[in-house]
């Protein structure tokens, strides 16, 4: 079979913050429990290592934050991975869908550079700490920096992204 798979990963702090706004998630441990979410992320990392070894031309990981910060570059790479063209229609879509927030939580119109870090403003630090305490392994594997204080997040200069590799 000619199957290609992209695994999309996101910072667990952002995942949990985003899921709070979904009717189907709150109170569901497999959706909003940091331990469960991050256990899944750790298993995903182990699976990604294996799939990358077995199918290097058919499996790829993309971090949500990398896609959001560099939507044109990452979209080109993803389309190339699938053997699809990057053309003026794709670029026009990105032009209209990645620069401003329009609509509600399910809208496809987002300011892609601010969306991945929205959790820093919305989650109280005690909740960030609770998530991080459950997610140290997953965060290390996927290249997410631990925030050490509320003050660190308030300044707006905290960069949660670290290098990572699946190998």
Image (cartoon, rainbow, N blue to C red):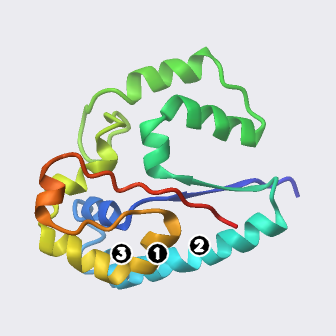
* Residue that label 1 marks: 138
* Residue that label 2 marks: 45
- Can residue 33 be seen by looking at this rendering? no
Q: Secondary structure at mark 2?
A: helix
Q: Are marks 2 and 1 in contact (CB under 8 Å)?
A: yes
Q: CA distance from mark 2 to mark 1?
A: 8 Å
Q: CA distance from mark 2 to mark 3?
A: 18 Å
Crowdedness of circle 2 by 10 Å Cα count: few (<14), some, many (20+)? many
Q: Which mark is residue 27?
A: none
| Image position, residue 16 (x, y; %) | 30, 67
* Residue that label 3 marks: 31
Q: Secondary structure at mark 1?
A: helix
* The image quarter in which residue 77 lies: top right
| Image position, residue 30 (x, y; %) | 39, 81
In the displayed structure image, the side of residue 84 where residue 118 appears, left or right: left
Question: Closer to us: mark 1 or mark 3?
Answer: 1
Tell me the residue at 59%/72% (across/down). 45
Q: Looking at the image, is mark 2 or mark 1 earlier in the sequence?
A: 2
Q: Looking at the image, is mark 1 or mark 3 earlier in the sequence?
A: 3
Q: Nearer the viewer, residue 3 or 156?
A: 156
* The image quarter in which residue 122 lies: bottom left
- Can residue 27 be seen by looking at this rendering? yes
Q: Nearer the viewer, residue 144 or 13?
A: 144
Tell me the residue at 54%/20% (across/down). 91
Q: CA distance from mark 1 to mark 3?
A: 16 Å
């Amino acid at each position: 079979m000619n199957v290609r798979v992209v695994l999309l990963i996101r910072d667990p702090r952002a995942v949990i913050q985003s899921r709070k706004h979904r009717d189907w998630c709150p109170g569901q441990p497999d959706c909003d429990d940091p331990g469960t979410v991050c256990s899944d992320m750790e298993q995903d990392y182990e699976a990604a290592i294996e799939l990358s070894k077995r199918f290097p031309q058919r499996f790829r990981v993309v971090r949500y934050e990398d896609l959001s910060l560099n939507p044109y570059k990452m979209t080109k790479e993803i389309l190339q991975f699938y053997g699809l063209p990057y053309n003026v229609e794709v670029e026009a879509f990105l032009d209209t869908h990645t620069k401003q927030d329009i609509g509600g939580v399910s809208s496809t119109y987002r300011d892609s550079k601010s969306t991945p870090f929205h959790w820093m403003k919305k989650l109280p630090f005690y909740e960030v700490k609770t998530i991080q305490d459950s997610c140290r392994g997953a965060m290390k594997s996927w290249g997410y920096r631990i925030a050490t204080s509320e003050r660190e997040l308030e300044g707006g200069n905290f960069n949660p992204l670290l290098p990572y590799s699946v190998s």
